[in-house]
Amino acid sequence: MSTPSAVPDVLGPDLDVVFCGINPGRFSHEAGAHFANPRNDFWRLLHAAGFTPRLYGPSEQFALLPLRIGITNAAYRTTPGSGDLRKADFEGSAARLERIALDLRPRVIGFVGKEAYRGVFGGRAPHGLQARRLGAAALFVLPSTSPANAAVPWAERLSWFAKLRELVP
């Protein structure tokens, strides 16, 4: 089972949404913060979709908790890219997310990228709301916000973030 990384979970009880990235990249590891690569669109999409009243940055990740937003990762190991992850890096991740769902009771767990969802549960999942649940938490798959996913246009990524936002008004 993976051990926690230099990037801490941002979690608390009764959150509206917990965003689950795939794993920390080098920028995030060095900053000790989620989605820290300046070319990653996560923080901009969070604001543009209406989750935050202003643009927050990675160093402000714990300021999301009063907004009822949390962040974790599917795998804890830092890698140069998600393609460097191994199946073993996801060992125990489904049970860990289920424990988060049962203990902290978020309304939705939003996977930031299809590969984050696939790493946890296996198989392929389309973007959007999934049939599977963890406890009472709905599961939602978003496009990756990584610079490596730049082929997916901003408007399309924003559309999926906005659909998730509609689930947690």
Image (cartoon, rainbow, N blue to C red):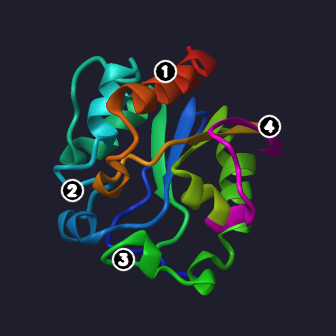
- Using residue 34 as the reference point, say whether residue 56 is left or right of it: left
Task: Please say if 5 is above or below 28.
Answer: below
Q: Identify residue for label 4.
A: 136
Q: Identify residue for label 2.
A: 37
Q: Identify residue for label 1.
A: 162
Q: Of circles 4 and 3, which is in front?
A: 3
Range of magenta residues: 119-136
Q: Of circles 1 and 4, which is in front?
A: 1
* Residue 152: image tag: none
Asked whether residue 166 appears in the rendered view, the answer is yes
- Asked if labels 1 and 2 touch by Cβ distance under 8 angstroms, the answer is no
Q: Mark 1 falls on what kind of element?
A: helix
Name the one closer to the observer, 150 or 101.
Answer: 150
Q: Mark 4 falls on what kind of element?
A: loop
Of marks 2 and 1, which one's residue comes earlier in the chain?
2
Q: Position of residue 95 (x, y in %)?
A: 74, 66
Magenta span has 168? no
Give the amino acid type for the residue marked by disc 4 in the picture.
Ala
Q: Identify residue for label 3.
A: 78
Give the amino acid type for the residue marked by disc 1 in the picture.
Ala
Q: What is the crowding at mark 3: few (fewer than 14 residues within 10 Å), some, or many (at least 20)? A: many
Of marks 2 and 3, which one's residue comes earlier in the chain?
2
Q: Mark 2 falls on what kind of element?
A: loop
- Using residue 23 as the reference point, say whether residue 91 is left or right of it: right
Q: Residue at x 19, y 70 (%)?
A: 30
Q: Separation of disc 3 and disc 1 at Cα? A: 29 Å
Q: Position of residue 42 (x, y in %)?
A: 33, 41
- To which quarter of the image does residue 18 belong? top right
Asked whether residue 96 appears in the rendered view, the answer is no
